[in-house]
Amino acid sequence: MSDQTPLLEGVSVSRETLGQLRDFSALVLKWTQKINLISSASEEEIWQRHILDSAQVYAAIPAGFSWNTWADFGSGGGFPGIVIAILASETDKNIILVESDQRKSTFLRTAIRTLGLTNVRVESRRIEDLAPLNADVISARALAALDMLCAFAAPHLADGGICLFPKGRRAPEEIVAARASWTFDLHEIPSQSGDGTILRLEGLTHG
C-alpha cells in the first residue's frame, strides 16, 4: 500500500494521487494561457487557492455518510470537480461535471483523459436542461448566490443527499436570503485555505 501524505485536515492521499493533483495544476496553468480557467492573480497560488480549497470540499462530507454519485455544477476549470474526481479515483464513485461553456467542457474532458480518471463524465449543458441526476452530493464553487444554488440543486438531489457550497464573506446574508424560500439544516465549516466557509446543506426542501 502506498504511503499516505496529509493534504489537509481530514484528507490524506497516496503519492500517486498527490502526483495527479500536481499534474492537474500544471494542466490548468497551461490551458489558462488559452482560456480563462483561473485568474492571473491566483496562478502563483494555485495549490492553496484552488487545489486545497477544492480538496476541503471533499473533506466536508460528514463522517459515515455513504454516497455513490457526486455532481459538481459549473465545474469550469475543474474546481472542485476534477479535484474531487482525483481524490475519489481509487473508489467506485461516480462524478458528474456540469459545465455549459464548450471550451471549458473540452478542457475538463482533456483533463479526465490525461489524468486517466474513470467514472467521470462531463455534461455540457445548462443545469436547467438536465434530466434529474439523483446525486447524493452536489457541489458548486463561485457559481451563484445560495438561493439560486438551492434552486439548481433541488431537482437533482437524491433523497437524503447533501449540498456542499464554498462561500466567502457574504455567506451570512446569502443564508438569510436563501431561507426566505428554502428550508434546510445548515452546518458551517470554516475554510482551511482562506477566510471563507463551506456551507453543508441537508434536508433541502422548497418553502
Image (spheres, rainbow, N blue to C red):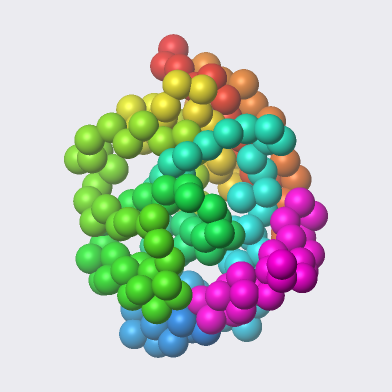
Q: Where residue 23 appears, x then y in whole percent? A: 53, 81
Q: Relative to residue 178, is residue 45 drawn left or right? A: right
189, above or below 182, in the image: below
Q: Residue at x 47, y 63 (%)?
A: 82
Q: Does the magenta segment cover residue 51?
A: no
Residue reaching furthest to the front = 1
Q: Where residue 204 appears, x then y in whole percent? A: 49, 22
Q: Residue at x 22, y 51 (%)?
A: 125
Residue 22 seen in the current view: yes
Q: Residue at x 66, y 43 (%)?
A: 60
Quarter assignment of residue 90? bottom right
Please give the range of residues in magenta: 1-24
Quadrant position of the C terminus in the picture: top left
Name the residue nearer the viewer: 29 or 10. 10
Tally of numbered tags = 0
Q: Residue at x 32, y 36 (%)?
A: 133
Q: Where residue 161 appears, x then y in whole percent? A: 50, 28
Residue 74 seen in the current view: no
Q: Relative to residue 1, is residue 46 drawn left or right? A: left
Q: Does the magenta segment cover residue 17?
A: yes
145, above or below 48, in the image: above
121, above or below 77, in the image: above
116, above or below 23, in the image: above
Q: Where residue 172 appears, x then y in whole percent? A: 65, 34
Quadrant position of the N terminus in the picture: bottom right
